Amino acid sequence: MDYFATANRVSSNGWARHNASRVAQVFGKVGYTSPQTRLTFSVTGAHNRLSGAQTLPLGMLTDPTQSYTWPDYATHHFAAFNATARHRLSGRAVLAGNLYFRRLLSHELDSNTNDGFNIALPVDGANSPGVNAVAESRATWWPTSMPVTGCPDAGGHSCR
């Protein structure tokens, strides 16, 4: 039996206002090997949030710690599981399989200023100081495979 695991977490208040971030990741794998069989299972996960990851216009560089488009943020949640199996059925035939699941959830808020905003005019649909854009995406994968293969001897070398 073999195994490996690792994890990390980084939290930061950031060097500017409103740009605290958090990154958390984990990975683990376990395996089993016998003369005829190899089994593995692994898991990966991430839970991240990045805030205030915007750039500043040149005119604002007198105070680079100020926030230009607060409350921008992006969150990403990822999970993956993978199982593999390989078993020698006979001297030349092998049954192998791979099953995995992956899921990604992302959510973002981007605040955008309106360069054409006129403070002297009333605020309405045509004259707005800015707008928040929200984006969310979800993706899930469930692919699998299970081939049976044969392996002829080649050049005096046998199958492994």
Image (cartoon, rainbow, N blue to C red):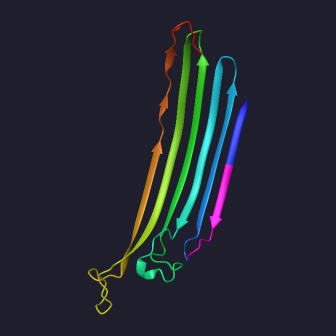
Residue 126 is covered by the magenta coloring: no
Horizontal arrangement in the rendering, residue 81 relative to residue 130 (left or right): right
- Toward which corner of the image does residue 3 lie, by quadrant? top right
Q: Main secondary structure of the magenta part?
A: strand
Q: Residue at x 69, y 43 (%)?
A: 5
Q: Which residue corresponds to the image point at 68% horizontal and 47% vertical from the top-left?
A: 6
From the top left corner, tell me how far across and down residue 137 is, in percent: 43, 55
Query: In the rendered structure, which segment of residues is drawn in magenta?
Result: 7-16
Residue visible at 28% across and 91% down? 121
Side of 122 where 89 appears, left or right: right
* Between 42 and 4, the one nearer to me in the picture: 4
Residue 2 percent coordinates (x, y): 72, 32
Q: Give above or below for 66 relative to 148.
A: below
Total labels drawn: 0
The quarter of the picture where residue 132 lies is bottom left
Q: Is residue 52 left or right of residue 10?
A: left
Q: Give 38 or 115, whichever is nearer the viewer.
A: 115
Q: Quadrant of the N terminus?
A: top right
The quarter of the image holding the C terminus is: top right
- Rendering coords of residue 60 (x, y %): 45, 81
